[in-house]
Amino acid sequence: MTVANTLTLNFNIFNSLILAGIIQGFVFALIWLFNKKYRAKSTYYLIALIGIYSLSNLQYYLLDIGLFDPALFYDLYQVPLSLCMPPLLLLYGLTLLSKNTFATRKPWLLFLPFAITMCLALYYKYQLLINKEESGYSIFLDQIPSWSEYIAIVYSLAVLIYLLFVIRVYRKSKSFSITELKPRVKWFKTLVIVQLCSTVLWVASELAFGDSYETSYYYPLWIVLAIVIYWLGHTGIYKYGVLEERKKLRKEKRSSFSVMEVRNQKNTTIEALDHFVVAQKNYLDPQLTLEKTAQELNLSTGHLSKLINTKLQQSFKDYLNSLRVEEAKSYLQNPDFSHYTLVAIGLEAGFNSKSAFNASFKKVTGLTPSQFKSQTRN
């Protein structure tokens, strides 16, 4: 294979990856548009952020495949979308963490840098169109494309550093003690760190190639954005949908449902165990352990384990999982929850993962959750 063929192949691969990211962004937008369970304030900002990422990549993709003249692109066609990314990320983070600040009360103020830059850019484009022979008539306006990138970089760094500070404070608050919020905060912190790394890559690209019309220098940055688009859509939208389903399950079901009545046992310790685990519904806590239960009952771990094995003829883990399976079965049998995902049902029943839910459910019932659901519907 010649050098020219290799370069052409690499060009096609990079462009395919970038185009895939753009298409994914628009697909996620359509999913959000036609699925009501994703309609929360935070996802409004998230889908807008995904859309901006996709449109930004699209304009550079069209430049890269030769649809625009590079000399005219930055003067006439480029839209400074990068200035929309920092405020949308900030608003998404603040609403995701339910943090009410001045920014969330008056979000439009965060878009002033974009609005001002866009107005100046439009004025400059207009002047270029009516004064075609005087393309460099204004040193100030002529630098708008470059300045908008530099302002966006500074804006992004400021937002990301601030969000890391907000996350740090939030992790110390009482709200963070709620188990279901921990994965959400963890993934958002990871997102902020990834964004920080991509911004550093952006800075490096601008410093090294900012004055060049060669678009291939920016392939790594655009591919990172394509990956971020997919990650935002999958985790931010799909997992949010699972979380919303869990909230509805809890609201509609838990107030009235009890997996079983507390057993009348002659052994007072088993009665106390049932009261703590079943009546108080602590089996729904995926973090519940034998050690924690023994501490609550003022018993040693070994004594409680031996008692459960002797009196209930099962291990503590099987005891918990049997209760969780019964909880999940009640959801699967209820037509009101027929459109809910198995992931949401399993997590809400107390399992910490889909794989653990499937394994335990099959061990107890001999069927997978999906098989049980199909049989119930038939």
Image (tube, rainbow, N blue to C red):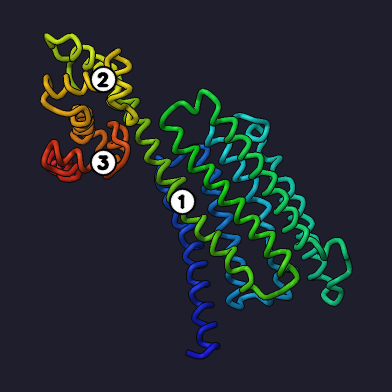
User: Could you tell me the amino acid type at mark 3?
Assistant: Ala
Instruction: Report helix, strand or loop for mark 3.
Output: helix
Q: Does the image show residue 254? A: no
Where residue 178 sits: x, y (%)?
44, 27
Q: Could you tell which of marks 2 and 1 lies nearer the N-terminus?
A: 1
Where on the picture, by quarter, is residue 257? Answer: top left
User: What's the distance in space between the residues labelled 2 and 3, CA to CA?
Assistant: 19 Å
Residue 83 seen in render:
yes
Q: Residues within 10 Å of mark 2 (few under 14, many from 20)?
A: many
Q: Are marks 2 and 1 in contact (CB under 8 Å)?
A: no
Nearest to the eye among marks 2 and 1: give it: 2
**Residue highlighted by disc 2:** 277
Front of the two marks 3 and 1:
3
- Side (left or right) of 117 relative to 279: right
The answer for how far apart the CA atoms under marks 2 and 1 are is 37 Å
Element at label 1: helix
Q: Residue at x 44, y 47 (%)?
A: 235
Where is mark 3, residue-wise?
356
Contact flag, marks 3 and 1 (Cβ < 8 Å): no
Task: Choose between 168 and 267: the one closer to the eye.
Answer: 267
Sooner in the amino-acid sequence: mark 2 or mark 3:
2
Residue 62, image x and y in percent?
59, 71
Determine whether 297 is above or below 361 in the image: above
